[in-house]
Amino acid sequence: MALDTAPATDVEIVDERRPRDFSRLPWTSFVIITVLVVVAVFAPLIATHSPTEQSLPDKLKPPAWQEGGSTEHVLGTDMLGRDLFSRLVYGARVSLTVAMFALLSGGLIGLAIGIVAGYVGGRTDSVLMRVVDATLTFPTILIALLLAVSLGAGLRTIVLAITVIIWARFARVVRGEVLGVKTRDFVALARVHGCSDLRIMAIHIVPNVMNTFMVLLTLHIGFVIIVEASLSFLGAGIPPPTPSWGQMVADGRSHIASAWWLAALPGAAIMLVVLAFNLFGDWLRDWLDPRLRQV
Amino acid sequence: MLLEVRDLHAHLQTRWGLVKAVDGVSFSVEAGETLGVVGESGSGKTMTALALLRLLPAPAGRIVKGQVLLEGEDLVTKSEREMRKVRGRRISMILQDPQTSLNPVFNVGNQLVEALRAHRAEGRAALRQRAEEALRGVKVAAPADRLRAFPHQMSGGMKQRVVGAIAIAPEPKLLIADEPTTALDVTIQLQYLMLLKDVQARMGLGMLFITHDFGIVARMCDRVAVMYAGRIVESGPVRELFKSPQHPYTQALMASVPRMEGRVERLPSIDGQPPALHRLPGGCRFAPRCRYAEERCRAEYPPTFTVGSLHEAACWRAAPSQPS
């Protein structure tokens, strides 16, 4: 038989680079996110004033472009005479820190539980998923408020509160993904090759749900920032005088008629950043999905 | 004797009741020999293979009776930990679908190394070297380059070769091939089968070849076992079984294979459905579909009769005629 000796030839291995079509990148979100990160990291260099230093004679100054405003306080001052621009800059730090820690802890817990539930299945899966269901039925803000009140306000409490809420969302989606991955033959073959369950989960399952996990992460940054802002708005977030966007909106509310910028500017910052992260998440989802990438 | 299976019973607890997926199966495989296991979907072929590896779906499936002797050692009584050393290293397996048999996120080299690492304490470079050897062993062109390729960059036939390379890289004694060519193009099928034969001859591999294709059995196997509803109904050397099939089920299966010679208006098929495994008929399980079925067939399951050298059939019609 001539066929059996012929070495199998195949198509050339093409180094498949991502198409370099810059126009398809979500530039708006890139720019906003980059600015946010730079501002948060270099806050002391960018801020023009101390965010907590009060100066009552300078209170309620309007932004520079308005009548009565000065370039000394570009975005004006609040009722205690604190520089609004500097407070916004430091507020970015709070938002990002909270988002980072809360997503890391909540995301990783959710990932682990989702993988175990999906892979092990059976009773373990049922129990874990009922816990997820139960967690998801709690109103987000209520549970966070409860924790904040009982544990005392602070960065750690906020991170904990958001973690408690958010892990369930990760666990549910990851579990669904694992159910699909584990039925594929490479998992069965790994078992045939003497792989232990733990190793199969670590080597074969985790990398295959990583795309989904990354998309979940980015799509939830916006959510976390909003929760943090809401908590701070309600007074259960970062305690003053540390500036936080949500708390700034709350403080500015009572002056909305006379000094609109106090509530409007931090509100706009929250909106822009959340929008940017959501757009980025959407784009990432499409980009990581090979079926959509060609289109 | 490389592998000897004695009276193996494997049951699955499903929501419809107890399914006797493997119900008293015995067979053996010698080193260097290929045993074909033929049967319809759901006849227990794959479950038999999984039972050998003690990989029945947990917690529903378990072996309730019987022995699986690999080089004389009973696998049924081994601990899970000991079984992990048997899997891959002594018994390996190739599955049907090359599209999902490889992990899409790792390149070929990493997957081969991963399979080897479980069994060999060697450095990364040495394992890499072995991986390249393994690819060369399944006649993949430019194996060194191919190690860096990802599954989606390869054709189905090429992927199945890689799956084969992974299976035989740890140098197992027994290879279970579960319909390895079903998902391949017909032209590639033959190449792949020849490759398996070649590897088998080189390594003295015992092979358990699961298929539903009698054409492949004729080409690949030394002996055949025909399964129906969890039991082996007929077994024997390929030539003899093809020349004079004894069990009506085997005959019907062979009649339904299209042939090149002569014109065929319509292929004969077997009426009815295989029995539901949780509600098996009493007596011979093929009786409801068998055109020769008699009273006795419905009442009592036939014992296995010897009908030739190494040729056995579980059918009353194969019973030696008794002087009455």
Image (cartoon, grey):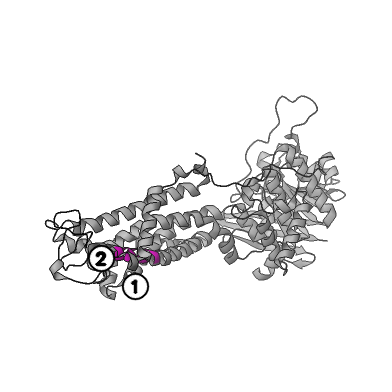
> In the picture, residue A68 is in which quadrant?
bottom left
- Measuring from the top left, give residue B322's x and y in whole percent: 84, 46
Image point 44% across, 60% down: which residue?
A171
Classified by dominant secondary structure, the portion drawn in magenta counts as: helix
The alpha-carbon separation of the residues under discs 2 and 1 comes to 13 Å
Q: Answer left or right for A95 relative to B153.
A: left
Disc 1 sits on a residue from what chain? A
- The residue pinned by badge 2 equals A232
Residue B120 is situated, as x and y percent measured from the top left of the image, at: 73, 67
Is residue A54 found left or right of B168 in the rendered image? left
Mark 1: amino acid? Arg
Mark drawn on residue A156:
1
In depth, the one of A75 and A87 nearer the eye is: A75
**Magenta includes B293?**
no
Residue B36 is labelled as none
Res B247 visible: no
